Image (cartoon, rainbow, N blue to C red):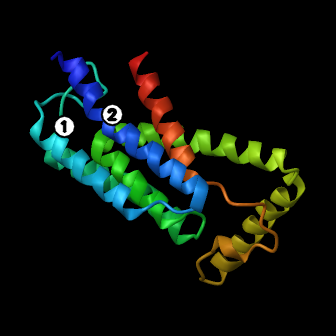
Amino acid sequence: MTPRLMGLLALLPLGMLMLLAARQDLSSNRIPNKIVLIGVVLGVVLNGVLPEGWGFNSQIPGALGWWASLKGLAVGMGVFLPIYWLRAMGAGDVKMMGMVGAFLGPDDVLGAILSIFVVGGVMALLVVMWSKQLKPMLQNVKLILYGSAVKLSAGEAPLMNDLPVSVGKLPYAVAITLGTFTYLIWQRL
């Protein structure tokens, strides 16, 4: 088996688990812990036992090692955790990002996160425009900025649940899945 094929086969479980999580998020607005836990364990184990390389999607495909996998898990969750604390994202999204980090490692998970934020932003705009909620969304952005400034000046933490009108929920597992796939494909070009 060629190293390149081995790298792609190691990413196959990640892709399947992300698709399962996205489907579940679309249908129930939840990402099951079981899917995420299986993904984290697989990511850490595959990075620990397969032949060493620069990552499964790199020029020299192979495992990053146990430590790099755990750092990727921490970075993935660490970037999304503040967004969860602001109540702008669910805990399942944070855990799913940790799963992605366990497979990709600390460096590639940062690239994937950037891609996820772009895809998520485009998805949010499309959903808002499709549902004709642009004006309420812009009002919410204004309230977020003003309310956050007031709360911060009073020494309080701003939260995203103080909005008068919700323009809907975005199943962010879909953005995580599409953004990660986009990043992985872009790395191959």
Q: Secondary structure at mark 2?
A: helix
> In the depicted view, which residue is nearer to us: 32 or 64?
32
Q: Position of residue 66 (x, y in %)?
A: 14, 47
**Mark 1 surroundings: few (<14), some (14-19) or many (≥20) residues within 10 A:** many
- The quadrant in which residue 151 appears is bottom right
Disc assigned to residue 189: none
Q: Judge left or right: residue 14 versus residue 137.
A: left
Q: Amino acid at mark 1?
A: Leu
Q: Residue at x 36, y 56 (%)?
A: 36
**Mark 2 surroundings: few (<14), some (14-19) or many (≥20) residues within 10 A:** few
Disc assigned to residue 64: 1
Q: Residue at x 45, y 24 (%)?
A: 185
Number of residue marks: 2
Q: Judge left or right: residue 134 versus residue 162.
A: right
* Residue position marked by numbered label 2 in the rendering: 12
Q: Amino acid at mark 2?
A: Leu
